Amino acid sequence: MNFTIRKAIKEDMSRVLDLINQLAIFEKEPDAVEVTLQDLENDGFNENPAFECLIAEVDGKVEGTAIMFHRYSTWKGKILHLEDLVVSEDMRGLGLGTALLDEVVKFGHTLGVKRINWEVLNWNAPAINLYEKKGAQILRDWNVVHLNEKGIKDYISKL
């Protein structure tokens, strides 16, 4: 299979949003996506983009994406956070995810980051196997903490 991985352009965001919705379905949260096409276009393609995006293209069609952003670790310094790596359902298992991950790691290396981090659901065995095979360390003793929009408002109301 011939494919290309490249930096996303604004015009790719409609398909990227489709992939984000596919991921939500795969992760059993089909109604969780709140981000809009306008959000992706505005937040990713302005003077100070909130995220970086790579896409995997097969025969001119976007079939995968990796969305990442810069973070700072008080222990390590500059790090890169891989928010999501998504491959369309009918293209999974063909190497696109691995190729995207390879490019994310290369990108992080060129930035001189001290760490690249991301989350994976504990039941996503194929992804976990890939990450461990590539040398990633799965930190099973840490819990991810989220404070959603309602939680933020509730928190602020109690100050």
Image (cartoon, rainbow, N blue to C red):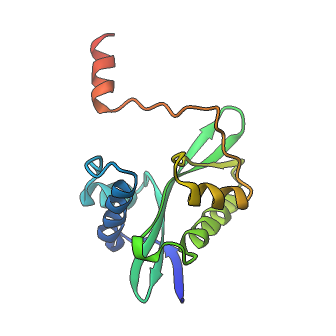
Left or right, 66 with reference to 22 = right
Classify 100 as above or below 34.
below
| The residue positioned farthest toward the top in the image shown | 159
x and y percentages locating residue 20 in the rendered image: 36, 59
x and y percentages locating residue 73 in the rendered image: 64, 37
Q: Nearer the viewer, residue 12 or 146?
A: 146
Residue 18, located in which quarter of the rendered image?
bottom left
Q: Quadrant of the C terminus?
A: top left
Q: Residue at x 72, y 61 (%)?
A: 133
Classify 54 as above or below 81.
below
Q: Nearer the viewer, residue 90 or 62?
A: 90
x and y percentages locating residue 124 in the rendered image: 52, 53
Q: Nearer the viewer, residue 94 or 48?
A: 94
The mark tally for this picture is 0
Classify 111 as above or below 102.
above
Left or right, 118 with reference to 25 = right
Q: Quadrant of the N terminus?
A: bottom right
x and y percentages locating residue 12 in the rendered image: 35, 72
Residue 156, located in which quarter of the rendered image?
top left
Q: Residue at x 28, y 23 (%)?
A: 153
Q: Residue at x 28, y 19 (%)?
A: 154
